[in-house]
Image: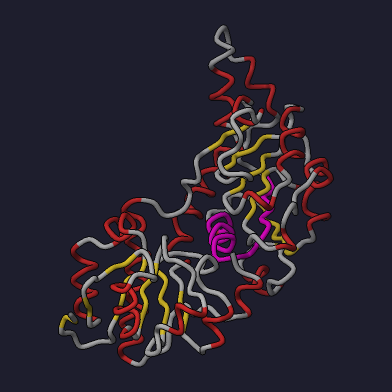
Amino acid sequence: MTEAGPGPLTLLVMGHDTFATQFAEPELARLREAAALGDPLVVDELRSPRARARLAEAEVLLTSWGCPPLTADVLDAAPRLRAVLHAAGSVRPHVGREVFDRGLLVTTAAEANAEPVAHYTLAAVLWAFKKVPFLAADAREFRADWGYRERRGELSGHDRTVVLVGHSRIGARVCALLTRLDLARVLVVDPVADPAAIVAAGARPATLAEALPQADVLSLHAPALPETRGLIGAAELAALPRHAVLVNTARGSLVDTDALERACLGGELHAVLDVTEPEPLPADSPLYDLPNVLLTPHVAGSLGSETRRMAQAALAELERYAAGHPPLDPVTRSDLAVRA
């Protein structure tokens, strides 16, 4: 049964736990105002008769984590579908060429997700300048005096160089934070970004080969693509200065894990890893036990109440669609070749 509503008939497709986290009463009230809804309001699969009945009448799918792939047979069952509005970041897990072949509008809430990742990265960079996580690990072993703080290179936030690999949504935010606060020289490695935009942001474009030997901190913000798999391998890690810090909040596949383990075992490379490959690492990975490595369980992106900002971004797209306005953050077929 369809709820009366002024807007397009909308079906939410996501995990039920995701729905409960992302849609509190303010978001639900906004949804009811913007769209016509039905029963069930939200589904986490698109195969059952009940889900197919809703799919057959839906004009808009509002999706998030847990949405199954929108395959050709799913789309064949949705003859009225016109838009897929995603309340999360990457649409890759559920949107493929079939969606674009049908000319459907696709949007993402990746801009909202970029904020907490950029904030985590800024914190990691600031701590990396003074080796805070690694000295904290050392303190558990060296308790007699503070002589151990000389073991990890210069502990300074002045006159440092940060290399950002990727001028992506997140990379550009980190660049803006660093340059606005005048925290470091910033080099940006991104072969598809406009060099003029990088310069306008207060940074300097560079190749990976040019940038690595200058990096006090190397922070990764590139998408996971076949071309970027293993982008940072043994040669790249060896090119970093002694006591450099690698920060990865992007994708674990960007780094050759075996090479990273060998480099960190040497003791002079430091790493802050929010993502790894595989994820999580095997229980016997040496990275768990090294004081020069900080591991966090993929927490930089939106979690808990932060995810409601992504729901709000998708609702803004729904409202614009209902009003006949252009989307704020559309995803095109060509975008999938260069975005995470």
Determine the residue located farthest toward the left in the rendered image. Answer: 4
Left or right placement of residue 172 versus residue 261 in this view = left
Q: Residue at image x 62%, y 44%?
A: 278
Determine the residue located farthest toward the front in the rendered image. Answer: 49
Which residues lie in the magenta part?
A: 160-179
**x, y percent for residue 203:** 66, 62
Give whichever of 327, 159 is nearer the camera: 327
Q: How many marks?
A: 0
**Quadrant in which the N terminus is drawn:** bottom left
**x, y percent for residue 19:** 30, 61
Q: Is residue 246 magenta?
A: no
Q: Residue at image x 33%, y 80%?
A: 318
Q: In this view, does 316 lie above or below 180?
A: below
**x, y percent for residue 27:** 24, 67
Q: Quadrant of residue 146?
A: top right
Q: Residue at image x 29%, y 55%?
A: 21
